[in-house]
Amino acid sequence: MVPFGGKFYNSLFLVWCLAYEIRLGDLFSFSFTEQYEAVEPADTVFAVAGEDVILPCSVKPNISVVDMRVEWFRPDLKNSLVHLYEDHDDRNTNQSQSYRGRTKLNHQELQRGNASLKLSTVQVSDEGRYKFMIHFVYMLLFYVYTTMNVLHLHQAVAGSPPVIIVDGFDQSGGLHLQCESEGWNPEPVLEWLDSKGVRLSSETTETHRNEDGFSVKHTVTVYETDSKIHCRVKLKHHMLETLIIPKEVESKVEPW
């Protein structure tokens, strides 16, 4: 059990309220026993500048948080408030200026314990660390706080145009092709397509990451040398593509 003010040690942060009993004279007694989980996203949150993004957060079990205080903030900023919901309304008087008019909580979803934040028109300056806090209030006599794990928001970056390398023909007439692209963030999707747009299965795939981003490399063997073969790399709204016509290189390549 984690004491109040202690460090959370799991990706699921548990807040325990055990056997609290509040007595108001001899009129009645109130006891509360429950377990709550603030569920973090499985992966880093990525966004594209100019687009909208959802910063996910939910409370398990799905209890309503309509009557509670919900706060999103940036611990790395001096004016850290990103969004505040309290007393059944958004209270953003002290909101950081750069977020004015760009944040929204779905009040209907709050009834299901979903306090995910929508951030509109993402800016490069939005990149950073975000935290979520919810204040549970019971009879205004004690508070329990739970803080969600840090979210990272990064701008998606398009890499270099894909390059197709001819790796020779085999004895059965198959043409071995290799396609590579680098400098993407996060990891992109690379796919081969024939002249009709049908996806071809890659034989080998490689992904590497360095300080410049992700590089991807896929190979394929094709036998229909009259058609065009496309290599396409895509990430959200970014898409780069190159093509090769095997027949044009057939006479220039020696068989294995």
Image (tube, helix red, strand yellow):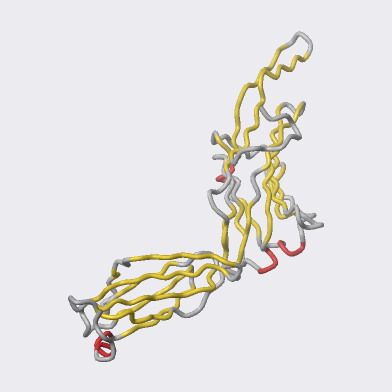
Extreme residue toward the top, this view: 26
Quarter of the picture containing the C terminus is: bottom left
Task: Choose top left, top right, bottom left or bottom right for residue 114.
Answer: top right
The residue located at (61%, 53%) in the rendering is: 117
Quarter of the picture containing the N terminus is: top right
The residue located at (57%, 34%) in the rendering is: 63
Extreme residue toward the right, this view: 78
The residue located at (74%, 10%) in the rendering is: 27
Extreme residue toward the front, this view: 256
Task: Choose top left, top right, bottom left or bottom right for residue 127.
Answer: bottom right
The residue located at (56%, 71%) in the rendering is: 157
Numbered-mark total: 0
Q: Is residue 237 left or right of residue 100?
A: left
Q: Is residue 166 above or below residue 101?
A: below
- Position of residue 54 measured from the top left corner of the image (x, y, whole percent): 57, 56
- Position of residue 42 measured from the top left corner of the image (x, y, whole percent): 53, 49
Q: Is residue 44 left or right of residue 127?
A: left
Q: Is residue 152 left or right of residue 234?
A: right
